[in-house]
Structures are given as C-alpha cells and as structure tokens.
Amino acid sequence: MIEEEKCMNNMMVSIHCATYNHEKYIADAIEGFLKQKTNFKYEILMHDDASTDRTADIIREYEKRYPDLIKPIYQSVNQYSRGQSISKLNLARAQGKYIALCEGDDYWIDPNKLQKQVDYMEAHPECSLCVHGGYIENASDKNNRYKHRSSKKSKCFSVVEVIEGGGGLFLTNSMLYPLKYQENRPEFFKLAPVGDYPLAINLSLLGKVFYIDEPMSVYRVGVSSSWTNRSTSNVEKRVEHFRQIAEMLDEVNNYTNGHYQEAINRTKYENQLSVLLEQRKIREVKFLKNNVYYKTIGYKKKFIFFLKQYFPSLIPLLKMTKRRYSKWILR
C-alpha cells in the first residue's frame, strides 16, 4: 500500500546516496546520476552526514542547479556515530518504485545503467534485485583499476551463491531493488556490520537476483572516510567485522530454519580461515585445514589461501597490478 501511494506520481527510481567527507569524489557521483538517460522520472536523494569538509557545499551548488532532481538532507550532527541507520533516514522520503544505491565516493559510468536495470525489473516482476559489473578503482589513482565481475555472463544467482559470495560478490553501487522491500526487514539486519551483504541475502530470499555482465559503475577503495576503510583498516577491526558477520549468518540460519546451514557454515569457515592467515596463526590454520569444509573449497580460493599463508606480501602487490592474472585471482 505504501509503495502504491508513493508511486502515484510516476517516480520510477529513487537514488540513495549517503556521503561523508567526500569532497574529492562527490561531484563524480552526482555527475553520474545526472547523465542517466531514461524514459522515466527519477530523484536523487542525498544524505550528508555532517561532513567536516566541503562535501555539503558542493551538494548545495548542484542543488541550486537541479532543484527538481537533487533532494538533500544536511545533518548538523553525525548520525552514523549515534548508531542511526542512514538508509532509513534518507529513504523514508523515497518516492520511487525502485531504489538504486551509490555512495558519495563511488560513481556510475554508463548513462543507460538505470534504464537497463529498470527494463529488466519491469519485464521480470519475480526479480527482487538487479546488479551489474563494474570496476574497482584506487582512490588515489583513477588509472589504477580492474574489472569486477560477479560472473562471466549475465545470470540469476541463487540464495546459496549470494551467501557464499560474501559482501564482495556484488558492487554496492550496482544494486537496484523494489522500494517495497525496504520495510519490515528481518532481525539479522540489526546484527550486520555492513548493509549491502544482508540486503543481498534478504532480497535473494524474496525473489530472483539477476546480474548483468556489463561494467556500469566504479567502486573506489582507499577512501579514508569510507565505511570499509574505517571498519576493516587493520587486522583487529577485520576480526571484529567477521565475528559480527558470523553472528549475522547464524541469525540468517535461524530465520530460514536451517535451510541454508551448509552454505552458512562453509562461509563462516572460509572467513575464519582468512582471518587466521592474516594474523599469521599458522598452527590454527593447519588445524582448520583438516576441517571437512576445506575439501569443498574451490581451487581458486585455495590458491588465494595458499598465497596468504606462504606469500602474504604478494597479495597487496597483486591487488595493485593491472595484469590479467591478478584480475582473475582477486575479482
């Protein structure tokens, strides 16, 4: 009912853009929104979480030029630090049938991105999430990027694949889903240290997840004010991050009455193994390798674990290189 009332104005997409101290990047994000070529109406919902740099000023400049498109919220006190849900604050006013995500330090590069995704969703009402490929880019060097592909072809992803794919399976700025799924979220959302991973899991439980194998956005890494950098910037933070992910997955298991327990246990195992390798706890790693789940890991992941155990210094080098081999390993 709420969705029907909000969509009476024929607004098709509400873009959710959360930003904090993104003065170097926010213009790229907004320009990507403005360049979208669509046969439907869309709105740009900006939420600046009390930035201490010029982010809000830059948004205001665009707001003056595009008052009918850009609809900002300027916080005077940081809401994230108060434990508030930024998506709830920003999307409570959403008028679109669909929500498209893009944080202020990322950007879209395909002017037909929204049109392609909406066309698919409209033709496939059973679809609860549409995502696509893109690039991962170093924030300090636009020329240092590599492709991110969730699959080698366009396809539907199963719930098991979404769970086992983890938070990095889909680029957050590629996600588009119906507004109606924004409300009444399961309890496991409250336990998650991130928003995109539980969102993808929940949407996969509600319908089909379709991936378009085209690079249509850029996801930046190495941004000091980004959530990822703040929450996983050192080993201790990553240990806590994966502890919370494990709690969230346990709650997913309860929510689904154990239907995906094997996938959940395997994912928790791989996360634990990865953290132990970073901590250089080799004895514990050798013990975990005797676990039954180690035999189920694919050769690609085993090779990554091998590098982390015996050649950890190679991992950051491979992430930085543009060679095709490293793209295959780390995408």
Image: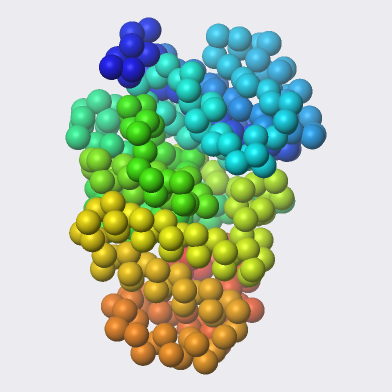
Q: Is residue 17 visible?
A: yes
- Residue 26: image x %, image y %? 66, 32
Q: Quadrant of the N terminus?
A: top left
**Residue 81, image quadrant:** top right
What residue is drawn where x is 58% and y is 73%? 315
From the viewer's perspective, is residue 146 above or below residue 115? Answer: below
Direction from residue 190 to residue 223 in the image, left or right = right
Image spot of residue 323 (x, y percent)? 54, 66
Residue at the farthest right position: 53
Q: How many marks?
A: 0
Residue drawn at x 45%, y 55% as measured from the top left? 167
Q: How is the image coloured?
A: rainbow
**Left or right of 45, for residue 265:** left
Give coordinates of residue 292: x percent, y percent: 29, 83
Q: Residue at x 38, y 32 (%)?
A: 182
Q: Is residue 194 above or below residue 90?
A: below
> Which residue appears at 43% of the width and 63% of the height?
246
One can see residue 117 in this view: no
- Give x and y (percent) for residue 221: 62, 52
